[in-house]
Image (cartoon, helix red, strand yellow):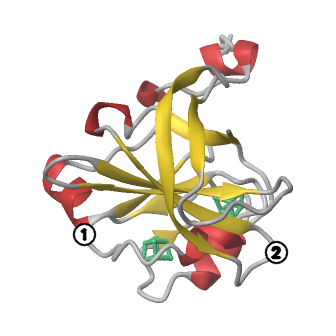
């Protein structure tokens, strides 16, 4: 008899790092996309938009898989994902850049101060917006934040 295992995120709606495929330290220094899409849904614009074919799926219902060695961190997949499930992380010497999708108003501006939020929506510190890209319907925002928070912060609240 098949035993159905319910994952923690299916109860809470909140992913944790153990649910995700993660890059190594060298790949994080280069800057790569983290795909936080774990449900088999018919969706694949992330595959089509990637200029270096770093994202793949067996079929449209599959969970996307990323090749961190191919990913250049170009961020195109962040603004195209309807599930707001892709982030680009780049670890630098003294801080980190987190690029995330943002669909609220007002549109953030470079230089705005924000409160950084984790996957549960809890405040995790203050940060500054360093880049805003509006070439898609979804605004793509890059924040500069403490390195230790790079794999935790996934949303922002404008101050
Ligand atoms: S960041 Fe660019 S290169 Fe990397 S997976 Fe997304 S679209 Fe592809
Ligand atoms: S575009 Fe986003 S929601 Fe759709 S399969 Fe890719 S990561 Fe998942």
48 to 56, vertically: above or below: below
Q: CA distance from mark 2 to mark 1?
A: 28 Å
Q: Quadrant of the C terminus?
A: top right
Circle 2 SS class: loop
> Residue reaching furthest bottom?
51
- Label 2 sits on residue: 137
Counting from the top left corner in percent of width and height, residue 115 is at 59, 34
Q: Marks 1 and 2: in contact by CB < 8 Å?
A: no
- Label 1 sits on residue: 69
- In depth, the one of 10 and 3 nearer the eye is 10
- Which residue is at a point 57% across and 46% down the rendered structure image? 113
82 to 71, vertically: above or below: above
Counting from the top left corner in percent of width and height, residue 135 is at 70, 84
- In depth, the one of 102 and 119 nearer the eye is 102
Circle 1 SS class: loop
Counting from the top left corner in percent of width and height, residue 121 is at 67, 25
- Which residue is at a point 73% across and 23% down the rendered structure image? 13
Mark 1 crowdedness (10 Å alpha carbons): few <14, some 14-19, many ≥20: few
- Which residue is at a point 20% across and 55% down the rendered structure image? 92
10 to 107, vertically: above or below: above
The image shows a total of numbered marks equal to 2
Give the left or right position of residue 118, taking residue 14 as reference: left
């Amino acid at each position: 008899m098949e035993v159905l295992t319910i994952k923690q995120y299916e109860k809470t709606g909140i992913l944790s790092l153990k649910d995700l495929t993660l890059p190594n330290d060298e790949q994080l220094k280069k800057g790569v996309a983290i795909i936080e899409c774990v449900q088999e849904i018919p969706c694949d614009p992330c595959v089509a938009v990637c200029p270096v074919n770093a994202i793949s799926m067996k079929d449209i219902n599959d969970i996307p898989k990323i090749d961190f060695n191919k990913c250049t961190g170009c961020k195109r997949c962040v603004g195209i994902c309807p599930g707001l499930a892709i982030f680009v992380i780049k670890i630098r010497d003294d801080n980190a850049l987190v690029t995330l999708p943002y669909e609220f108003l007002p549109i953030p501006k470079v230089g705005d101060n924000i409160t950084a939020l984790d996957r549960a929506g809890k405040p995790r510190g203050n940060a500054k917006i360093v880049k805003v890209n509006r070439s898609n319907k979804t605004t793509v925002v890059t924040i500069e934040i403490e390195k230790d928070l790079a794999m935790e912060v996934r949303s922002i609240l404008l101050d």
